[in-house]
């Protein structure tokens, strides 16, 4: 361990179980709750032990104890930077709660993030895996990412192209980046277009909008969806299908939806005509991981103290008292069965520490 004197906001031997939504046991040798750029800069330089960055801990699997310095990004603040004829530009600090940012922008009259309502996690984590839901990825609303280089102490700025966004992926996921604590995302700037268009193509959202009472009297034609109505529909669907980590610990979707070649999709379509398939712009085909897991017999099934959730087979849940090794064992069992049944490989979505 370094001889360097640590600032007094760095704690030692901290229990992490309550700081991640899967509630797995583990301790951090050093733990810093970082509330300002100044505090983050105090932890820059190369003489510190291995670093790892977390936000809300909603996409993290703890395999055990962590012997380095865990940086919990708690920086707050959100503001309208300005607007032009086409868009509003909103900046938020990395530690802001994602869902609260969505609700705040809607309340201000700046729509555009409503399909991403209720996604757990922080603003700083959103660009890392390019969070997405119901036909929208955050990349489509992102203008720039600000970060601190922890070796040099320099401020970095990434425009949208430099983020190299892909399906649930970005440059920030690469080794040595944000999570390894060498460059840490500090603020994110969003671009919310004034020419708003509803995105209601996903069946669950469309059905929920149908169910919601119209804001207009029955004699009038159906009301077009507003940003707030879409947010309400998304929240209703998510609350119905996804377990609340406060009562049933989980890390959201546990596997990526696999994107396979057209020929693999064709082979699967012949064997399983009912299988949902979503053609992509590049000719490949996206499959629904939840469907594959259910088809392999894992929906609602447990392995020891962990299981695949009964309402949504893509969510791995901790039924109580499980450890990281049990999560890894279940993930491997599910992967093996999906491979055996369908010949498709599933890749885990959360980060393993
Ligand atoms: P769903 O609506 O049951 O659909 C299953 C999968 O099929 C989805 O993952 C989705 O892919 C794809 N899909 C469905 N309708 C589609 C359409 N009209 N066009 C293109 N692809 C379509 O999915 P769900 O599990 O309840 O999740 C709903 C949405 O929330 C999805 O977008 C999902 O990615 C997102 N979500 C993400 C997490 C997370 O932890 N990352 C957790 C829960 C939900 P896409 O994933 O590409 O949308």
Image (cartoon, rainbow, N blue to C red):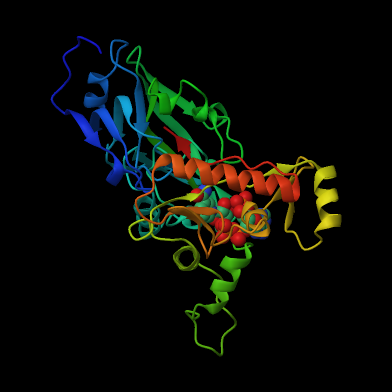
Observer-nearest of 209 and 78: 209
Front residue of 310/202: it is 310
Q: Is residue 106 above or below residue 123?
A: below
Q: Which residue lies furthest to the bottom in this view?
A: 219
In the figure, residue 295 lies in which quadrant?
bottom right
Residue 35 shows in this picture:
no
Q: How many labels does the image show?
A: 0
Residue located 39% across and 20% down the image: 182
Horizontal arrangement in the rendering, residue 33 relative to residue 254 (left or right): left
**Residue 54 shown left or right of residue 199 in the figure:** left
Front-most of 206 and 240?
240
Q: At 39% from the left edge and 37% from the top edge, which residue is drawn?
A: 62
Point 49% across, 81% down: residue: 213
Q: Quadrant of ligand 1?
A: bottom right
User: Quick check: 188 above or below 253?
Assistant: above
Quadrant occupied by the C terminus: top left
Q: Position of residue 305 (x, y in %)?
A: 42, 53
Residue furthest front as drawn: 304
Place residue 10 in its image quadrant: top left
The residue lying at 79 percent from left, 42 percent from top is: 283
**Residue 135 % position (x, y):** 60, 54
Residue 220 screen position, x and y as percent: 56, 85
Q: Tell me: residue 3, above or below residue 255.
A: above
Task: Classify residue 290 as left or right of residue 228.
Answer: right
The quadrant of the picture occupied by the N terminus is top left
Q: Is residue 241 visible?
A: yes
Residue 270 pos. (x, y %): 86, 56
């Amino acid at each position: 361990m370094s001889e360097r004197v640590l600032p007094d906001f760095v704690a030692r031997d901290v229990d992490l179980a309550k700081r991640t939504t899967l509630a797995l046991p583990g301790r951090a040798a050093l733990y810093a709750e970082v509330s300002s750029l100044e505090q983050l800069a105090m932890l820059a330089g190369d003489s510190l032990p291995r670093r790892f960055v977390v936000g809300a801990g909603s996409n993290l699997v703890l395999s055990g104890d962590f012997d380095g310095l865990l940086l919990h990004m708690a920086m707050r603040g959100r503001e309208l930077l300005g607007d032009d004829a086409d868009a509003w530009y909103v900046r938020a600090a990395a530690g802001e709660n994602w869902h609260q940012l969505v609700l705040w922008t809607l309340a201000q009259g700046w729509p555009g993030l409503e399909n991403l309502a209720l996604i757990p996690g922080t603003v700083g984590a959103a660009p890392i895996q390019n969070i997405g839901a119901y036909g929208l990825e955050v990349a489509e609303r992102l203008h720039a990412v600000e970060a601190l280089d922890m070796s040099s102490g320099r401020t970095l700025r990434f425009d949208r192209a430099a983020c190299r966004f892909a399906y649930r992926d970005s440059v920030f996921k690469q080794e040595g980046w944000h999570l390894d604590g060498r460059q840490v995302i500090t603020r994110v700037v969003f671009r919310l277009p004034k020419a708003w268009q509803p995105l209601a193509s996903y069946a669950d959202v469309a059905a929920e909008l149908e169910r919601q009472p119209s804001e207009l009297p029955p004699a009038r034609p159906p009301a077009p969806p507003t940003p707030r109505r879409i947010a309400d529909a998304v929240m209703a669907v998510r609350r119905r299908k996804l377990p609340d980590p406060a009562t049933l610990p989980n890390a959201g979707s546990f596997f990526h939806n696999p994107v396979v070649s057209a020929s693999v999709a064709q082979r699967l379509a012949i064997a399983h005509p009912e299988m949902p398939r979503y053609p992509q712009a590049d000719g490949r085909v996206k499959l629904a991981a939840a469907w594959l897991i259910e088809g392999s017999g894992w929906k609602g099934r447990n392995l020891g103290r962990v299981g695949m959730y009964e309402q949504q087979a893509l969510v791995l849940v901790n039924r109580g008292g499980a450890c990281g090794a049990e999560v890894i064992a279940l993930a491997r069992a599910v992967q093996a069965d999906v491979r055996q049944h369908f010949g498709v490989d599933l890749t885990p979505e959360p980060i393993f520490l």
